[in-house]
Image (tube, coloured by chain):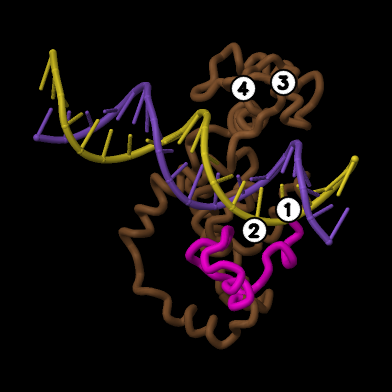
Chain colours: A brown, B yellow, C purple
Amino acid sequence: MAPKNDGSAKKVMNKGAWTAEEDRKLAEYIEIHGAKRWKTVATKSGLNRCGKSCRLRWLNYLRPNIKRGNISDEEEDLILRLHKLLGNRWALIAGRLPGRTDNEIKNYWNSHLSKKINKVKPPQPEIVQEAALQDTSNINEFKEEGEDSKGIGNFEVNFDVNELFDFSTEGSYGLEWVNEFLELGEESWLTENKMSI
DNA sequence: AAGGGCTCCAACCGCCAGCGA
DNA sequence: GTCGCTGGCGGTTGGAGCCCT
């Protein structure tokens, strides 16, 4: 995509690490006007940053109630299970972990968990592949649109998680099903909910 | 002590979907 | 219906700091 000319002389945006001063400006602006219309936030706050950059900084760093570092064993376990269930859908996984961001979980996965998984890597799940072949309707449709289109990663599920789980309950984080999932263990949970993977 | 390799994480990039004009 | 704008997402990268020899 070619850079757009906005009519004015090309404005060079700041890039790279945020300074404390920039953080302060952004936080101040959002406190007054709210976190919406990121392009407006970027221009009106006096930050020489693009809207995307402001949004990312706010969501991953400045937002209140952010938990940073020290991912507990419980959280790690949850990430592992959710990743098995959802694939690389970091935003969805992060939505189940209050105070955690998709970026943090993605980083944690890439630097810690993916290595762990590789170490204990079981043989390729033939059962899963067989099952997929038996009920290919959803997956094939999906694949025809683009083999590795985003979301599912290298793991395929033959149900629509968004249909099955109400991800709109952000207030309570909709954690009930997760708790149930963890308590029952994934196989029992999937059986109980009549799903197969 | 130094310097080369490795790890981790903040931030950028590109793509896509939703929405309004 | 289409076009442009915007926000959201996952993948990738760059660099600071740590570790090892």
Residue wearing tag 1: A174
Tag 2 secondary structure: helix
Residue wearing tag 4: A10
| Residue A100 colored in magenta in the image | no
Residue wearing tag 3: A43
Q: Which residue is drawn at 54% across and 60% down?
A: A87
Q: Is residue A128 above or below residue A101?
A: below
Q: Which of marks 2 and 4 is in front?
A: 4
* Apparent side of residue A16 relative to residue A136 in the rendered image (left or right): left
| Residue A152 colored in magenta in the image | yes
Q: Which residue is drawn at 57% across and 72% down?
A: A143
Tag 3 secondary structure: helix
Residue wearing tag 2: A178
Sequence-earlier tag: 2 or 4: 4
Q: Disc 3: which chain?
A: A
C-alpha distance separating marks 2 and 1? 8 Å
Marks 4,3: beta carbons within 8 A: no
Q: Disc 4: which chain?
A: A
